[in-house]
Image (cartoon, grey):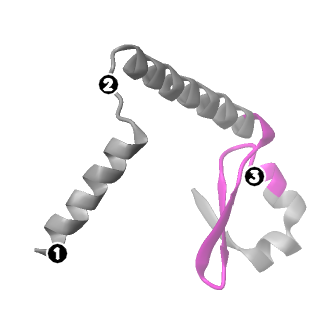
Amino acid sequence: MEVLNASDVKSNFGEVLLKTQQGPIGINKNGKPAAVMVSASEYAEIEILRGKFFQQEIDQGMADIAAGRVAGGAQVIQKLRQKVLDAKL
């Protein structure tokens, strides 16, 4: 991935915009990573993948509930408290 300084991106925005059609462009501000610029089509693909990932997580959670692999809030708090107490020892 090509990485540019924010000031270079600002002064050459049109050129950088065209470069995003070939791949992501990293943008540094004060020498540190600040952003990544991607094409609209690549962003759309990322959003589709994100949606699929969230749906898989929801499906797994529903399967866990159906199989009884869940704990109630009180049980979770009790386990956390025990971990804290054990850590103090």
Q: Which residue is mark 3?
A: 19
- For mark 2, give the secondary structure: loop
Foreground: 53 or 14?
A: 53
Mark with earlier residue (2, 3): 3
Q: Position of residue 74 (x, y in %)?
A: 38, 45
Whether 19 is among the magenta residues is yes
Q: Is residue 11 left or right of residue 20?
A: right
- For mark 1, give the secondary structure: helix
Q: Position of residue 55 (x, y in %)?
A: 57, 24
Magenta stretch: give its range: 17-41
Q: Which residue is mark 1?
A: 88
In the picture, which quadrant includes the N terminus?
bottom right
Mark with earlier residue (3, 1): 3
Work out how far the residue at label 1 is from the one at label 2, CA to CA, in angstroms.
29 Å
* Location of residue 20 with respect to 28 vertically, above or below: above
Q: Amino acid at mark 1?
A: Lys
Q: Position of residue 10 (x, y in %)?
A: 85, 72
| Residue at the (79%, 70%) spot, across then down | 9
The image shows a total of numbered marks equal to 3
Q: Is residue 38 left or right of residue 89?
A: right
Q: Is residue 37 left or right of residue 56?
A: right
| Residue at the (54%, 30%) spot, across then down | 53
